[in-house]
Amino acid sequence: MLSLQVVVFLLSVSEVISQCPPSSGIYLRHNGNCYTNNGSFFIDATIRPTPIECGLPDATLNGGQWIGPNGEVPCDGGNNQNVQCTTGSAANLSVHINPANGYLGANGDGLYMCCLPTSCSTPGTNIITTTIFRFAEIESFTVADLPSDMTVYPQEYKLNCTKIGHDTYDISMSIGGSTTLASYTGCNDNSCGGTELSGAAVLDTVRYTFDITWDGMTVSSGSISQSTTGDQMYQCRVADSPGGNEIRIRNVTIKVPATAPSSLTEVNKTATTITVSWTALDSSDADGYVVNVTSDTDTVQTVQVEGSSNNTITLNGLRAVATYSITVRAYQQLLGPASSAISVQTLPVINSINWTLVSSITQLNNTQYRIDCLTTTDINPSTDVYWLVNGVMKNSSIYTSIDALTYNNTLLVYPDPLGVSVNVTCIVMIGGVNYSQSVILHAPSGPPNNVRGFILNVTSIKVNWTSSSETNGYVIEYTTGGVTRNVVSTSEDEIVLSDLSPMSTYTISVYSYIDLPSVNSTITVLRFDVPSPVTSLSVSNVSTTGITVNWTIPSSDNYVTYYTISYASSCAQLSSVNETVSVGPHQSTTTYSYTLIGLYSGMNYTITVRAGNVLGGSELSMSTSAQTEAMIPSGWPSSIQVLQVNSTANRFTWNEVNCFQRNGLITGYTVIISNSSITYNLISTERYIILNDLVFGTEYNISVAAVNSVGRGPFSDPIVVEIGIVPGPVGSVSSIMDTTWAVISWSVPSYIPSDYPIITYEIGYHILQSGCCPMVDDDDIDIQMLRFFNSTNGNTFTARINNLDAMSCHIFGVRAYIDRGPGGWVFIANETLISTQFVTLTTCTCTQEVGSTSTGIYLRHIGNCYTNGSYFTDAGILSNALECTLPGATLDDGEWIGPNGEVPCDGGNNQNLQCTTGSGANLSIQATTFPGAAGDGWYKCCLPTNCSDPNTNIIFANIFSFAQIESFTVADLPSDMTVYPQEYKLNCTKIGFNRYDFSMSIGSTALADHTNCFDPNNNCGGTAVLNGAVVNTVRYTVTITWDGMNVSSGSISQSTTGDQMYQCRVADHPDSIHIRIRNVTIKVPATAPSSLTEVSKTTTTITVSWTALDSSDADGYVVNVTSDTDTVQTVQVEGSSNNTITLNGLRELTTYSITVRAYQQLLGPASTISVQTLP
């Protein structure tokens, strides 16, 4: 570097200046030209005649001197290599070559310096240098046009080698001393391409210029090239020709970094910039750096970085998502080698676009979605970002800075309208170029179809639907009353809506969604209630055994799963029948028909239809009546009897044809009485006939046939009777009733054939199926239903019958037997005891008031009237008599009979009870003191005659000591057998004495057990009955839960099977003088229906059947259908013989668990099968 500067300096000072001598400073002068700087050249020939003067103005010579390459030049005498010095005036010394001496000697060729005014060894002396040469010389060898802009590549520059002096010479230029870039011999000025410089200070000045190209690896000049690394050293050689007496060589070095910067690394990048760094070189090895950026083969930019320590640069103006190759070179005078290229891709302008559900999808068209568009920070998000939403421009975005490189630009969108997909495009403008990315929020092509609601229980509805398009889930909107709105979502195609309000109407819409919701489904309206009543009830297609019932179904918002068709005949012997037909919910028809078959001919039927669902049945619609067509009777009169009226007359009686076999209204009877000698064919409109002409002791065959409007029915099987051989009817049949037992009393028949004593009495009884006990007539007596109880002693005139049903009307019959057969039946009807004084059986009795003119027998105590079965404490009748009255009658030997026998009237007593006769038909009973133990129990009052008179009027009362159980009953037994587990209540009502022990149990397990209960303190949890007819009436209630295996009350449970028998026990405390026990039995099937079998199935139905239980073991069945753990439906099938059901509304290819239980008052155990519907 220094040699180059020297050369340049010499070139600059060799020029001749205009002022000579100068005003100050040392100088040289030759041939009138002044040289004030070092580095002038003088060929030896030019100083032979003309010396070179060295002067220092305004100075005085004081030992000044010239020194050459061969030492000091002597002054004023002698020479050195033919050069001699002459002292001038002032400070002036001249050198020249005396021509006489020839030319400059070889050792004198070179650099000379002039020192003034003192010697060269004197510090501070003034020195000027010049070169005195012989032959040819190189005045300068320099580099020209070195590039200042290092970004231009390859680099070009010039080498200038200037020859002076002798005009015949050889000249060459090389690099590294080995590679010749140019070489010329025998040059004569202008013959070798040099440029002669006119006006030059030295004779024959010729400049040779060489163009050099540097590509970073190779130096080339024309066709000649040489690879090189690091600094480039060039050499210029000039030699006089042909002798080569003086060979001149000059070198020049161009500084070039030898190595590339290392560790070129990406520091960071954006969409339009890349920042790189590298390991800086030492300042001696680099003046700066050039960074080159290319894309593919195109140079994108080249940047010059000045300063060796500046090793980082940010490249701007790049394109987004473009891959660039980046290299870095150090430079000094030229560029050095390139680093290994690194490849860097700029970031995208838009990194990503995504959407996020901000609010719940259940907000439907108010659902909020946030669109996040992540962009580079190379933009202004306020002005460079905009959006298209389904082609409509939106500018209402906001942005936040995530980091130094990323903005998050957000836009909120809504599904408006529903069912339309939303295409959101984020557009960013940068550098005049638009960049965009889009995201689509998909909406289903359509809403769900076939939306149906199914009521599961009192608080839940299941909704299901089908979907024909892609979906990720569903939103269910349901409202009630137009006010309460609820929205839920699910990924399944059904959902259970819980915690609903009963007795409400729900409007249900279902939306599907992928990202956005669909439009809503067809609105489904469902009344969450029992159905409305059916309307337009009518009948058609009436035949002898069938009636088609027609009705208009409830409106479409009603949920109906079954219809119960109830029909009751005019025949009291027939129970009403309930037939249940299951229907799929959401019937598309508006009318429904159902044909009742197996009906009885000529029978009047009252028909009602009730729509139902799992919540229960609707209110009954108006009933309709129809009569099946008549046909001749299919049955015949039964129980033909012959009663001896007197010694000459016989009364033939028979029972009516069973009403279900009459097949129409019976208008009369045909009676055939015959034997071997006579035949009577008689007609009667009554159910008896009296004949006076039959022969005593003669046998007759008797048959009877009924006649209706169509014709005569079949004759009964003939019976053979012998006139006068059987006894007459018994007399004075009466009864004493308790809740579950009765004592029947009678007297001996008025007629007993001679020689045929009575050997036994037969007692038959059955429950009256319907009607009122005091109004029983012959039509209510069904001999075929009698359960028989025999008294084995012909001299016994009472019988106790147990295990009767409480609070029921029973018909009792008694007849006498002799060896020749039985006599006729004599019947009485009476009721087992009821629960309270003011609750009566059916509607046939009424509460009597004082002064009442009602015609029925009644009791009166302290001004209050009581009916059959009333209770009275002994203390209550101690001070106030209990009156028994029959209005409008006259006393004719009436009586009171108690557990210890008759109570004497108007004198005497029985167990401290006595009777007093009143006016009319009135008998009062009163205690003279507390009754004895044998007087505790049931009393009957018979008016106006005694109790042996079969036509007397009877009423019962219970007179008791201490405490008594007025009733022990079951309440709230479930009518809907589909609700499980089942709950009911046991009510035991204590009356009388206020201190007692109380317990309630099942088997050996006590459900409640209290001792020393004292009513005023209410210490046992009973409920006082304020209007109880008896003092200290307290009801104890125990709630029972039955789960099919265990009976439980609170923390107490007891496993049981079959009928559940409970016992209530009350004993006066502390002596337990009277212990009262009442039992109540709840009918429960003991076994499950067997052989539960799949009969058939489709995609949506399953038909099953089972072996029906006997009517004594079941009243009907409950079929339960579950899927997994969810109850799908529960159906009640009424009637013990109905053992088949079709289950509708199921889903295809679904496995269901199906159980069936029999029920009576409660459900019995279950049987189970598993069935899968068809695809």
Image (spheres, rainbow, N blue to C red):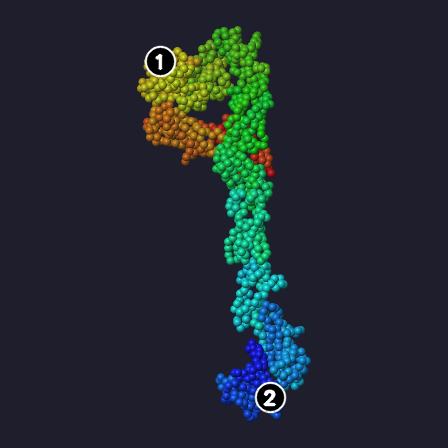
Residue 264 lies, in percent from the top left, at: 55, 65
Within the image, what quadrant is residue 1041 found in?
A: top left
Q: Is residue 761 above or below residue 976?
A: above
Q: Report the quarter where the C terminus lies.
A: top right
Secondary structure category for the residue under label 2: loop
Residue 240 occupies quadrant: bottom right
Q: Label 1's element?
A: strand
Please rate how many residues cluster around mark 2, counting C-alpha atoms within 10 Å: few if below 14, some from 14 to 19, many from 20: some
Q: CA distance from mark 1 to mark 2?
A: 198 Å
Image coordinates of residue 991 in percent, x first then y, are 37, 25
Q: Which residue is mark 1?
A: 917
Q: Which mark is residue 414?
A: none
Q: Quadrant of residue 932?
A: top left
The image shows residue 1, relative to residue 376, as above or below, that is below
For the residue pair 668 and 79, the one nearer the viewer reads as 79
Q: Is residue 963 visible?
A: no
x 51%, y 23%: residue? 575
Q: Position of residue 597 (x, y in %)?
A: 58, 24
Mark 1 crowd level (few <14, some 14–19, many ≥20, 10 Å Cα): some
Q: Which circle, 1 or 2, is nearer the viewer?
A: 2
Amino acid of disc 1: Thr
Question: Circles 1 and 2: CB distance less than 8 Å?
Answer: no
Look at label 2 and name its amino acid. Thr
In percent of the image, x 65 and y 83: which residue is there?
Answer: 167
Nearest the eye: 236 or 1059: 236
User: Residue 1140 location in percent, x, y?
Assistant: 56, 30
Q: Is residue 17 above or below residue 796?
A: below
Task: Choose between 1166 and 787: the one closer to the eye.
Answer: 1166
Q: Which residue is mark 2?
A: 50
